[in-house]
Amino acid sequence: MTKFISTTDKLRAQSLNRTGLEHYERWEMESAITLFQEAARLDDTEPEYHLNLARAQVRVGDYELMLHALGNYLRVEQDKTLLNRFQALFSNALDEVETRLTTIMPQHGVGLEIIGAAIQMWVEYRVAIGKSYLDLGHPESWGAALDYTVRKVNFVEVSIEAAFIAAISFSTAR
């Protein structure tokens, strides 16, 4: 049974979503979340509102609400490619990048906390890019870049030589 959504509610939801995107781009996440929530309440059949809500929630680190919003997104999205990409976030299996992170980083003496931060950054990125194309053709490059970036932002000393050796490890891992 399809729920009737008035033209007024559809237009209001579109306006709220546009304004929410403006706040999102300025990193005003609390107001963006409020606007996306209201847009999704007014028109819960529009996948974009749920996805934008998930994107904002992952940026503030609220993974439980991000997963809830993604669940609502998956309920209404019709694009099979996007459905497959976001459904993977609900699986227990690691993707190719996460597998490399959990295999290679411990071999280079990286602690579990930093590995977890790399996986968290990867999940956040996958959600935050929304419907933008995600090329996973080179998971070793993604893994090496995440390894280096997470070490640097967490003030873990890493020489250029060590980063190069780690990058080679990511590219040769199977």
Image (spheres, rainbow, N blue to C red):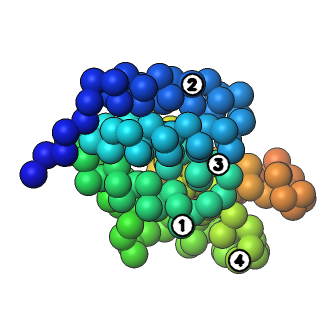
Q: CA distance from mark 2 to mark 1?
A: 24 Å
Q: Is 174 on the left-hand or right-hand side of 27? A: left
Crowding at mark 4 (Cα within 10 Å: few <14, some 14-19, many 20+): few
Q: Type of residue at label 1?
A: Glu
Say which of 52 and 44 sits in front: 44
Crowding at mark 1 (Cα within 10 Å: few <14, some 14-19, many 20+): few
Q: Is 28 on the left-hand or right-hand side of 4? A: right
Q: Which residue is mark 2?
A: 19
Residue in the picture at 48% in, 30% down:
17
Crowding at mark 3 (Cα within 10 Å: few <14, some 14-19, many 20+): some
Disc assigned to residue 59: 3
Q: Type of residue at label 3?
A: Arg
Q: Quadrant of the C terminus?
A: bottom left
Say which of 120 and 48 sits in front: 48
Q: Type of residue at label 4?
A: Leu
Closer to the chain start, of discs 3 and 4, is 3
Q: Which residue is mark 4?
A: 112
Q: CA distance from mark 1 to mark 4?
A: 22 Å
Q: Which residue is mark 1?
A: 64
> Residue 53 at x, y = what percent?
50, 45
Q: Under tag 3, what secondary structure?
A: helix
Closer to the chain start, of discs 1 and 4, is 1
Q: Under tag 2, what secondary structure?
A: helix
On screen, 136 above or below 67?
above
Q: CA distance from mark 3 to mark 4?
A: 22 Å
Q: CA distance from mark 1 to mark 3?
A: 12 Å
Residue in the picture at 39% in, 75% down:
92
Which-is-in-front pick, marks 3 and 4? 3
Residue in the picture at 62% in, 60% down:
62
> Residue 156 at x, y = what percent?
87, 61
Residue in the picture at 50% in, 49% down:
54
Badge 3 vs badge 2, beta-carbon distance below 8 Å: no
